[in-house]
Image (cartoon, grey):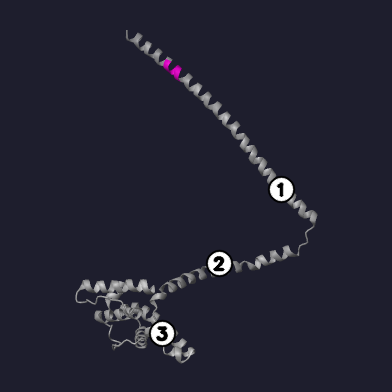
Amino acid sequence: MSYRDIRNFYEMLRALGYPNVLSMESFRHPNFPQVADLAVWLAKRFDPEIELPFDIENEEGRVTLIKNVANFMVTKANIKLNTKRLYQADGYAVKELLKVASLLYEALQVTTLDGKDGGTERSSISFKDFDISDRAHEVKQARQLASEITASAANLFDLLGKESDLRIARQISMNRQYEPSEVENSITKAIEAVSAEIDETQRQINNISTTEANLDSKIERRKVEIDRYEKRLQTLNKVRSVRSICLFY
């Protein structure tokens, strides 16, 4: 993680009211207690009533804490955190926590601007009164709408790319003067073409019965030939048996 990202992260924490003091060297080496404290504190900024077990003395407790924080962020803020990076408790963990801090910081900026525009009554609103947990569904819906808008924009761009060619064809069609007789002839030809297709289809349907009859007759002839060949084979086998007996004696 870059120096600028860490600096921005610390500035966001100060703006959000993080009570502890952090230095630029805090996460040069793994520092799980500090990461755990930050993760729980950021989670409580979303929901002050959340209870997260803070047992980091053993590996099982640390894993449980990271999983609980990650699940909470997914359900409440639709933010997916990399649990492996969080458990590393180094600069990569700060990069994951920066996702949460950025969302809270943006919400704080919006609240501050609304307070300035609304006068003294709105300026009395503090960030603690801003609860984003009940707007998680709106955030998810906004992201879905953004994806749909992007897809629609790409489709519209492709269609507009064809407009130059379509404009010429449309202009030619609009400027062309059609005679009633010409329109009538075109419609008549179209009707005749459709009628011809219908007649051809009907003829093929009628020929199916004839084709079936021909196939049945061929099958019967083949059966008769097979029976005749089988009888001839039996006769030849009998003659061969008689000759074998005569030669033996």
**Relative image position of residue 143 (x, y in whole percent):** 45, 72
Q: Are marks 3 and 2 in contact (CB under 8 Å)?
A: no
Q: Is residue 200 left or right of residue 112?
A: right
> Label 3: how many residues lie within 10 Å, few (<14), some (14-19) or many (20+)?
some
Amino acid on which disc 2 is placed: Asn
Amino acid on which disc 1 is placed: Ile
Spatial separation of the CA atoms under disc 3 and disc 2: 36 Å
**Relative image position of residue 33 (x, y in whole percent):** 24, 80
**Relative image position of residue 70 (x, y in whole percent):** 32, 73
Q: Which residues are magenta?
A: 230-234
The label on residue 108 is 3
Q: Pointer 1: what residue?
A: 191
Does the stretch in magenta take in 232? yes
**Relative image position of residue 4 (x, y in whole percent):** 37, 85
Q: Pointer 2: what residue?
A: 155
Secondary structure beneath disc 1? helix
The residue located at (38%, 76%) in the rendering is 133
Which of 161/234 is in front? Answer: 161
Instruction: Say if residue 80 shows up in the picture.
Output: no
Secondary structure beneath disc 3? helix
- The mark nearer the N terminus, 1 or 2, is 2
